[in-house]
């Protein structure tokens, strides 16, 4: 089992969005299942405290803001 850590950053300029990034718009809730599916990750590997932090952050977004969510994988050897 791998541990997948999530990080998030508030962004305000949607015109600069390039490539494949995962964004949560103001008024939407972060969905960890959809995130895992988008990146073909095992949902159970997402660090639960990080999932809650991203959910909390998404609930605080103001109009015009988006939350850019990314992850890093700590592989068990």
Image: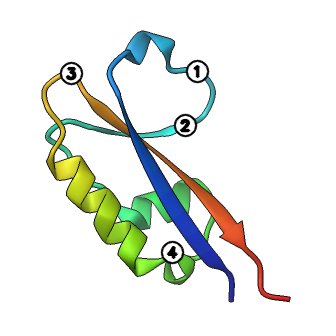
Q: Quadrant of residue 2?
A: bottom right
For mark 2, give the secondary structure: loop
Q: Position of residue 13 (x, y in %)?
A: 37, 15
For mark 1, give the secondary structure: loop
Reading the image, the residue beneath label 3 is 64
Tell which circle, 3 or 2, labels the residue nearer the N-terminal end: 2
Residue 8 vertical position relative to residue 54 in the rendered view, above or below: above
Quadrant containing the C terminus in the rendered view: bottom right
Label 4: how many Cα within 10 Å (few below 14, some 14–19, many 20+): many
Taking the spot 33% from the left edge, 58% from the top edge, the residue there is 54
Quadrant containing the N terminus in the rendered view: bottom right
Q: Position of residue 19 (x, y in %)?
A: 63, 26
For mark 4, give the secondary structure: loop
Tell which circle, 1 or 3, labels the residue nearer the N-terminal end: 1
Reading the image, the residue beneath label 2 is 21
Q: CA distance from mark 3 to mark 2?
A: 17 Å
Label placed on residue 18: 1
């Amino acid at each position: 089992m791998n541990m997948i850590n999530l990080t998030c950053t508030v962004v305000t300029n949607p015109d600069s969005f390039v490539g494949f990034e995962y964004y949560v718009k103001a008024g939407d809730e972060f969905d960890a299942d959809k995130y895992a599916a988008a990146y073909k990750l095992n949902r159970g590997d997402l660090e639960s405290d990080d999932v809650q932090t991203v959910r909390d952050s998404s609930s605080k977004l103001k109009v015009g803001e988006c939350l850019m969510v990314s992850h890093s994988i700590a592989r068990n050897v």
